[in-house]
Image (cartoon, grey):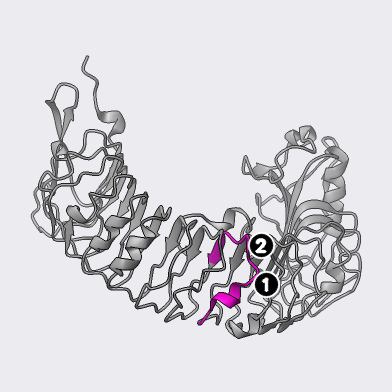
Amino acid sequence: MPCFGKTFVQCLWIGAVLAGGHSVPVERVPVNVSKGIPDASPEGLEPSRKHPCVCIDRYKNVECDESLRHETVDARYFRYEILCHSLSSGEPLRQLYRSLRSVAPDAQFVISVHKLSMAAIPARFLAGVKAHIVHLNTSYAQTFDSAAFEGLETRVLDLKSLADVPPPLEAISRIPKLGTLMLNGFHLEVVSKGLFPEGLTTLGLSSCAVRHVEEDAFPRGLLILNLNGNPDLTATSLENAFRDMSRLRTLVLQNTGVSNPTKDTFKGLKSLTTLHLSNCNIKQLDDDVFSLLPKLDSLYLGRNSLRHFGFMLGTNVSSLSIDDNNLTALDEALFEKIGARRLRALNLSNNGFTEVPHTLRHLSQLTMLSMRGNHISKLSWSALNVLRKLRTLDIGHNELITTEGSPDLPDLWLLDLSGNLLEDLQGTLTTLRLGKLDLASNRFEKLRIDELPKTLRSIRLEGRPTSRSQHCRFVFSLRVFRSGNITSQMCWRNNIRRNYQDQLASNG
């Protein structure tokens, strides 16, 4: 999913995607007795055949050093990571952990196990380990002892499986005070009541083959719920699933079979602020589909098959992403009503628009607009000039040949016109107070700095022009903006990435 508007990643997905590897023999981890710090692998920061686990200072991107001694319990959580690869038992990890704890008893750790080379996870696999976050790729492990996680203390458990086996829920229940549980790649067709600890605030069931959710199956205290990647999960199978989840703030239903949601699908979600419905094959939505979500702030509907935007937005929606659909026009009457709302970010990228819709003039609070990847051949500034608060405008990768009128957008800071067919700016941008401008991959043969805004801090221009001339393809005049005098001329060929903020001389 493209980063647009607010991102739930900051709230939820901590750490990288766990990678696989090859099974290798495991030996004990040597410890440098003089320092009390475990020796790192000779090959660098990655675990090796000899040392399957290493400690990494992620802020410095080096092996753990003496700074570990000064770590306190209230320090930043994610600085030190114990990284393991291809474990055939938990002993190397536990041994390294004990060594680190003897040196820094208050340090906070993230533990990442990238692969287990074992078919069964034994009891007390990580006993004695205390870490704020544990990422564990169980690989092709088929069975888990019911006491596999007994003795483990963590607030966040991220489990990934490649074996398509049921999740080890009984073993997970042995972890005290678990707040976040992320399951990926397990097999859990039916979610029933009582499966998960009631104390959870975040639950992820990504790609877990979920087909049906029983009533009241999820813990009532959840703030974040991720059901991404369950294609057999439909709106019907979610009936009454959320009726008592009044605290839920973020719901992720992208890449599911929820293709025809109704307002009753979301009944009970009184506090929901962020809803992801991307790539659900949605072709049509009822006008009142989101009417029971009074606090909805961010809505993601990208990569669907919508041809008509006819649903009403709540008064609190500030960010709407409806990219990669089949929209060609916007309803005038509907947007006149939406204009009274607080919509500030609108993503209409990769649709079928041939012009900037004049209906956008009703969105007086808009600060970000993306119409990237449409079929717009002429940019009419009159359709945008009423958007007085607009700060970011992306018209990149359209079919722009020319612009019409002059822009009058006092707050516009970032303008993206890359990937079009423009040959001349016609002096239209000089009135803007831009900080960043992207003109890459157009047809400019010649561009003068005095055609650009005086406030410009950076400009992107790489991309081969259409001319095959062996002469200088781009000519820039850098002027001293305070005096208006030409100070130098510079010429580049082929690819260009120019930031001239520090090149502009002062008048004296």
- Identify which amino acid the numbered label 2 is placed on: Leu
Is residue 53 shown in magenta?
A: no
Above or below, comparing residue 176 to residue 262 in the picture:
above
Q: Is residue 121 left or right of residue 180?
A: right
Foreground pick, 22 / 205 = 205
User: What x and y, as percent, mark residue 278?
Assistant: 49, 71
Disc 2 to disc 1: CB gap under 8 Å: yes
Above or below, comparing residue 117 to residue 409 in the picture:
below
Q: Give the range drawn in magenta.
A: 260-275
- Identify which amino acid the numbered label 1 is placed on: Phe
Is residue 271 shown in magenta?
A: yes
Residue in the picture at 57% in, 68% down: 292
Mark 2 burial class by Cα count in 10 Å: few <14, some 14-19, many 20+: many
Tell me the tag on residue 248: 2
Residue in the picture at 30% in, 43% down: 412
Residue in the picture at 54% in, 72% down: 254
| Residue 4 visible (yes or no) | no
Report which quarter residue 85 is drawn in.
Answer: bottom right
Residue projecting furthest to the top? 508
User: What x and y, as percent, mark residue 470?
Assistant: 9, 52
* Secondary structure predominantly adopted by residues drawn in magenta: loop
User: What x and y, as percent, mark residue 477?
Assistant: 14, 35
Q: What element carries label 2?
A: loop
User: What x and y, as percent, mark residue 358?
Assistant: 23, 61
Q: Is mark 1 on a helix, strand or loop?
A: loop
Report which quarter residue 169 is drawn in.
Answer: bottom right
Q: How far, Cα to Cα, is label 2 from label 1?
A: 9 Å
Tell me the tag on residue 242: 1
Q: Is residue 19 left or right of residue 282?
A: right
